[in-house]
Image (tube, rainbow, N blue to C red):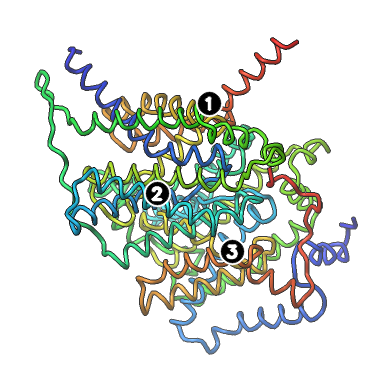
Amino acid sequence: MSLADLVSLVYQYLDNIAFLLLAALGLMIILGVVNVINLAHGELIMLGAYITTIAYHDANLPLPVCMLLSVLGVGLFGMALERFVVRRFYGDRLAALVATWGVSLILSQGALLALGPSMPSVPLPAWTLHYEGYSFGGYRLLLFAIALAAIIATWWVFYRTKFGIRTRATMQNPDMTRALGVDTRNIYLLTFGAGSALAGLTGALYAPTTTIVPLMGTQFVDVAFITVVVGGGANPIIGAIASAALLAGISTPLSSILGTFIGRIGLLIAALVIIRFLPRGISGYWQDLRYQRMARHSS
Amino acid sequence: MNLRGRRGLAHTLNGPQELGHGPVFWVCFAAVTVAALAYPAFGSVFALSNLANFCLYVPMGLGLALLWGYNGVLSFGQSAFFAIAGYVYGVIAGNLIDVPGGSLLAVAGGLGASVLVAAVFGYFVFYGQVSGWIIPLLLLVLSLILETFMGQTAGYQWRVGSVLFGGYNGMTGIPSLQIGEWDFGGASTAFYYLVVVLTLLVYLGLRILVNSRYGHVVTAIKDDVERTRALGYNVNFIQIQVFVLAAALAGLSGVLYVSWGNYINPASMGLLSATLPVIWTAVGGRRSLLAVLLATLTLRWLADTLAVRGGEYAFLIMGVLLLATMLFFPEGIVVSLARRYGGWKAPTGAMNRSGSR
């Protein structure tokens, strides 16, 4: 294998990591803090792509502005979703799954009825880099950079702001946090909004790369669900990074040699094997190790 | 608990885990049964075939009611087991079309394939003791991946023996179930009787199961996993058994479906199909088999009616129905009505706090 082949493989690996991170990060933050899985996450991504497309074609706004509109719009929509639907199901997580599935059906079928089976596509920003006969899409590299930026921003909010401290306290012990005067309902509302805004960002970013159809959410959610299951909700940042790096490492060689389907099957099998031994995902295992170490030091 | 003798069986059948007790209920039940069995005498072939089509989904719905309502394990992948059984039946029956008893072998193969996939999947998730939300998520992923796979099997190279998979167009010309001289085609009276009798057997069988000693353990697992484990029950193994049973029931529906329509396509395990059993179970009321049975028949009829006029609204209406039920009748519509007007209350662990962390 020549150096160019290696560069190409690394490029595909980074591309896959970016996809997994962007598809799953919002879902994972919501799982970690609010302890709920939003099955309409794929439809929120679809919504983000639609907002970008409509703003681009009908309002003739520049692409970055369209994407910002998606982030804001889907974030607000997510907060409304939390306030009027998800909030009622904090006692029963399986019921929350089913209720958000109803939302997902309504959104995808509603988009199909209101806006038709497909949308005009958004042109892909045409930056290409050439190296030894391979050409690489600059936009794909930008996606990876944005995925990293999203992770760093999440880390900064969690560990460097007052809101982050309250959020982590809520994750650890909601009753105690309430007793200390923090309105945890607000934390849940804002976290759900932030996770949804990330879905909107994902939809906006991938709008130029795929066809915009009402059921496009499904191509994101199957890998997003696997990433979330493998990463676990104990620490969304560690979980997202570790899980995306591991899963992209499994799917990149499999799908480039044996095809996309084998790549997906490989991901599912990897997820099953991992949860057999680490039922709370990688971040749950990492948290257990940390607690064990803390217990050893204090004794 | 008295489980011996005839009085014991009647006692179990009338146990507290299912709504519908007393003489009035059983007289109505018998009347509906007799009406269903007498229907071929005056119903048209078209009406019989339609009714058989509605009824054949009942085992899948009741399986999910057992799994979710009684054992607390949610599944979004019943359609995967439905379709696996359907496809495997199609492959075997298509190849053994001239062999006597070939379609019975195909039924065994179809159900066996569903059971096998469910057992392997169940081993990983139940022995891993994962949290409740992981199982429905991974089953949904399984369903979607299988749909993608079957969708790309167009072309002559995708075949087993003489049977083509057919990609998104699906597998066609699947022979109907045949036992001896009886041909259970979709439009036959024989198929109608087969489906009605199977529906009754599955309903009564599950009713006995949930009210038996075993059924009480199954329900105890839903109410408090750790306490049931502490009492010495092999929780993981019982959960796998229930999961496999539910998969087999979904597979039974799948086999009946291909025998009815001689056809199956990848959409039968797509996102929309995966939603349907969950909608039936949630709307009827997952804590009662009867409620799910009624909801399955009603919603199948509704979907059929909607498909005739305004098909594009069908899934939007189903989504609204699902969300509205979860918001306003979290126990399901039939169960809420039974509680309000019949005084029936599904026995639950009063101290259940497992979901409220």
**Measured Cα–Cα span from mark 2 to mark 3:** 21 Å
Q: Residue furthest bottom?
A: B42
Which residue appears at 36% of the width and 27% of the height?
A: A248
Which of the two residues, B167 or B325, is positioned nearer the viewer here? B325
Give the residue at mark 2.
Answer: A42
Kind of residue at disc 2 = Gly
Which residue appears at 39% of the width and 44% of the height?
A: A199
Please count the marks in the image. 3
Give the residue at mark 1.
Answer: A282
Which residue appears at 58% of the width and 56% of the height?
A: B249
Judge whether residue B101 can be spotted in this image.
no
Label 3 Cα neighbours within 10 Å, binned few <14 / some 14-19 / many ≥20: some
Give the residue at mark 3.
Answer: B327
Q: Is residue A266 above or below residue B192?
A: above
Labels 1, 2: one chain: yes
Kind of residue at disc 3 = Leu
